[in-house]
Amino acid sequence: MLYRSHHVFVRTEVSPPTHPILVISIPKNGTHLLRSILLSLPKTCSRLHLPSGIQGVNSCDALLAAGKSQLRNLKPGSVYSWHLPYFPEIASWLDEHEIKRFFIFRDPRDYTVSLCQFIMKNPPHPPPAPYFDFLNSLRNDSERLMHCIRGFTIGKATKTNLLSPDCLPDVNAMYRHFIGWRNDPNTCSVRYSDLASSQVPKSKNVQKNTFESMLRYLGVIDQPLSNEAFGELLETGTDPKKSPTFRLGKVGHWKQVYRPEHKEATDQIASELLLELGYL
């Protein structure tokens, strides 16, 4: 098993994790950013991304079976990722196996833009080709984005609220399956914009405080990070070149892409969600 090398200040101030780590996310919500940051810690190693709804694994029983099958022989510092909807049964199972977990989420409007553009630019990559074929059959990018907001089914599939290879739920339904992790007492919830706060006119204190909160949750620091250690983590952990699915990652990019009809549709479908997550 190969571990990453680290800079001197991180090695001095940050201890190696003593538990396996699971990154939980909604698709296109910053999975690889968070993974990369965690893999900047001493003696961490990248492990697999578990199957989920996009591979047709979307029920509690099927997801739990996938976890039991693939989260075996767990080692401290192993970093896994999973587009895992919230189920109390799965949370309890993860607790039993002492798996530290993070849940990352972003503005749902940015999710719709990122998802739509990602599908159109990466047809061979999951989400699978049927998503690309369907969206590509539409007249223009505005229609494609609207379908990512409202959801769609492919062929003769029955419309459901579950993500599957032939069904994309609307933005509200998609998020509702996952955001239970925000209230799970043993999960560290992270807002994407707080990790990427250097992209917006905020103090870097927000970013540094978020990093420190994550590290305290892991139990790998006992005092605030020095500016040098924080700089090393920031440099090695937020490099978009390390992510095979990183597209743009800008906070609030939806404001440059949404037309009035997209905003109206999102407000109709997900206004309570946006308010609940603090985006209204």
Image: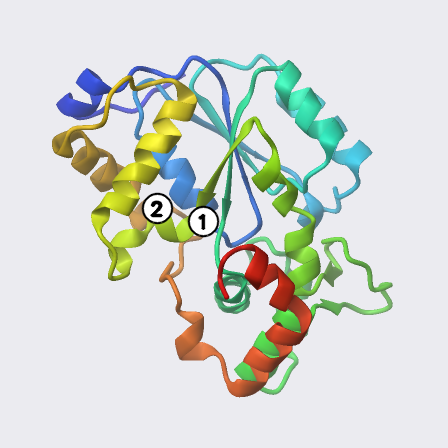
The three-letter amino acid code for the residue at tag 1 is: Gly
Which residue is depicted at the point 58% across and 29% down?
Answer: 185
Give residue 19's mark: none
In the rendering, at what x and y percent does residue 166 appear? 75, 60
| Quadrant including the N terminus | top left
Which residue is depicted at the point 58% across and 56% down?
Answer: 276
Mark 2 → mark 1, Cα distance in angstroms: 9 Å
Residue holding disc 2? 195
In the rendering, at what x and y percent does residue 39 appear? 36, 30
Callouts 2 and 1 close, C-beta under 8 Å: yes
Which residue is depicted at the point 57% across and 15% down?
Answer: 98
Secondary structure beneath label 1: loop
The three-letter amino acid code for the residue at tag 2 is: Leu
Evaluate whether residue 136 shows in this view: no
Rendered view: 180 above or below 145 = above
Dot 1, how many residues are within 10 Å of its Cα: few (below 14), some (14-19), or many (20+)? many
Which residue is depicted at the point 62% across and 46% down?
Answer: 179
Of residues 12 and 2, the one drawn nearer to the viewer in this rendering: 12
Rendered view: 213 above or below 172 = above
Evaluate whether residue 59 shows in this view: yes
Q: Which mark lies nearer to you, 2 or 1? A: 2
Residue holding disc 1? 30
Dot 2, how many residues are within 10 Å of its Cα: few (below 14), some (14-19), or many (20+)? many
Secondary structure beneath label 2: helix
Would you say 188 lies left or right of 223 here?
right
